[in-house]
Image (cartoon, rainbow, N blue to C red):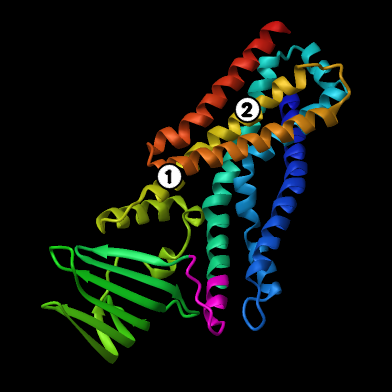
Amino acid sequence: MNIFSRYLIRNLFIGFAAAAALLVPLFTTFDFINELEDVSAGGYRWTQALLVVIMRLPRWFIDLGPFIALLGGIVGLGQLSKSQELTAMRTAGFSIFSIARIVLCSGLMLTLASGVLDEWVASPLQQRALQLKNATLAQAEHTVNTSNALWARRDNEFVTVNALDEQNQPIGIEIFHYKPDLSLDYYIYAEKATVQDNGIWILHDVNQKNWANGKEAVESKDSLQWQSIFTDTSLKELSMPSDSFSIKQLNHYIRYLQNTGQPSLEFKLALWQKLGRPILIMAMILLTVPFTFSNPRAPGLGSRLAIGVIIGLFTYISYKIIVNLGLLLALNVQLTTLVPPILLLIIALVLVYRFDKQH
């Protein structure tokens, strides 16, 4: 790598840093406003909400990676174009295609850094933030957080857990057991449970209903032993949303869902999104080349940034919509997550090729 390449990559990363410094605090502010809706007296405090938002900062950097790549590339290359340094590079023998290769190299470096940050920093921190919030909400009097309720199935037995307390013990357990003809055999509700090491749960404050010969029998018990369905992974992990999982956790959880007969499409989409996002970053960083050379004599970097913001927002929102539609309509996972970034990458490559031939 020669001195020109290093200089160009350095300026691009300065642009990435500037874009991240603008976008991440902006979206984090919206996140904090959203968290304030759950703040209550004697429960989830605003200081805890602020801590949760701060711990989710790396996740926002990952999610906004394609957006950051586009705006950062426009800033980095735009400054070099404005100062005529790109013209000097081209005079020294650099073609637009050669500059695009260096830009692509910087995008690859950004992608690798994002992947490492996602796997070992963003995912653990986001999970820790969610555990802190859920534990705080579980402690609040008369508060039950059902946003991350757990469901599981074993043959004709269905179980739901409303929440976990601060010790990651289940709260609000409901067990439905059906007969082969799909009529309800018995129903159990327990206020809480104590998880044993051997997969046995001790249910506390139990109400059980049984149906036999068309009659209903109700029985209350202080405790009841139950063989848990949740045996292949921890409850703490199961209570996390799909976007907080690392690749290793997603693979493990998808196998667990498939083995227990539960739908796993949401987590397959989350896994393949992690593979589609790097392609999207590479496509967005390549799009900065046409932005820069479309009218190199124009001084209006602000107008380019405005157009970049529109394209970045449109791409960011569109990709989210496509993924959610894939989940809603149960579309092919690879088709949903990989085809849009690949199409955008092809468009970017075609534009770079055309500008290289024209100039």
Image coordinates for residue 76, horizontal then vertical, percent:
77, 32
Which residue is drawn at the image coordinates 62% and 13% (left, top)? Answer: 353
Which residue is drawn at the image coordinates 43% and 64% (left, top)? Answer: 237
Q: CA distance from mark 2 to mark 1?
A: 34 Å
Which residue is drawn at the image coordinates 32% and 80% (left, top)? Answer: 189
Is residue 25 depicted above or below 16 in this figure?
below
Considering the numbered disc 1 on the image, is that residue within a helix, a strand or a loop?
Answer: helix
Query: Which residue, as the protein is rendered here, is positioned at the far left?
Result: 213
Residue 310 as seen in the image, left or right of residue 326: right
Q: Nearer the viewer, residue 41 or 3?
A: 41
Residue 247 as seen in the image, left or right of residue 158: right
- Is residue 117 something that shows in the picture? yes
Q: Nearer the viewer, residue 240 or 85?
A: 240
Residue type pointed to by label 1: Leu
Query: Which residue, as the protein is rendered here, is positioned at the far bottom?
Result: 222
Residue bearing the label numbered 1: 328
Residue bearing the label numbered 2: 104
Is residue 89 depicted above or below 207 in this figure?
above
Magenta residue span: 133-147
Residue type pointed to by label 2: Leu
Which residue is drawn at the image coordinates 31% and 86% (left, top)? Answer: 206
- Is residue 195 something that shows in the picture? no
- Residue 303 position by quadrant: top right
